Image (tube, rainbow, N blue to C red):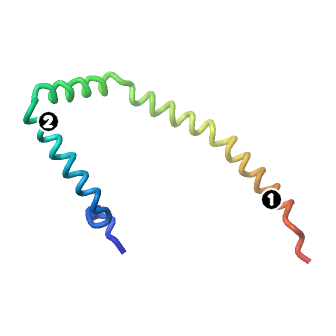
């Protein structure tokens, strides 16, 4: 069995892709540091201004609102399955 704490052993392609991504990021920082720093700054401002709490709260509220009807439909399906089972003789 593979150790889940060592993804490189589970997925050798994953390690290679990560190393490629890391090398690309390092190359970008070395070639144009101001552009990368500006992108990081803009991303930070965007994440600060974006109401992440409200978005997540809305998604949780939506999921909970849809949970009741989904459970009701699943319950009805199970009841119909029980009534449609052939009787044991």
Residue 76 to residue 50: above or below: below
Residue displayed at 73% across by 46% down: 73
Quarter of the image holding residue 38? top left
Q: Which residue is mark 1?
A: 81
Q: Secondary structure at mark 1?
A: helix
Percent across and percent down for residue 56 are 45, 33
User: Which quadrant of the figure contains the C terminus?
Assistant: bottom right
Q: Nearer the viewer, residue 81 or 13?
A: 13
Viewer-side label of 1, 2: 2
Left or right: residue 83 versus residue 2 is: right
Q: Nearer the viewer, residue 15 or 79?
A: 15
Mark number, residue 52: none
Number of residues whose C-alpha sits closer than 10 Å to that of mark 2, classed few (under 14), some (14–19) or many (20 or more)? few
Q: Which residue is mark 2?
A: 28
Percent across and percent down for residue 51 are 39, 25
Residue 34 to residue 63: above or below: above
Q: Secondary structure at mark 2?
A: helix
Left or right: residue 1 versus residue 78 is: left
Instruction: In the displayed orientation, state which residue is furthest to the right.
Output: 89
Residue displayed at 20% across by 29% down: 40
Left or right: residue 22 versus residue 54 is: left
Residue displayed at 84% across by 65% down: 85
Residue displayed at 30% across by 24% down: 46
Q: Disc 1 to disc 2, how far (Cα)?
A: 59 Å
Quarter of the image holding residue 53? top left
Residue 79 to residue 30: above or below: below
User: Which quadrant of the figure contains the N terminus?
Assistant: bottom left
């Amino acid at each position: 069995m593979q150790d889940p704490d060592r993804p490189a052993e589970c997925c050798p392609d994953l390690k290679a892709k990560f190393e490629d991504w890391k090398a690309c990021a390092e190359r970008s920082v070395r070639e144009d540091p101001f552009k990368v720093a500006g992108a990081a700054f803009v991303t930070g401002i965007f994440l600060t201004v974006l109401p992440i709490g409200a978005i997540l709260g809305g998604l949780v509220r939506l999921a909970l609102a849809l949970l009741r009807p989904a459970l009701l439909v699943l319950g009805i399906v199970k009841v119909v399955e029980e009534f449609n089972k052939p009787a044991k003789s």
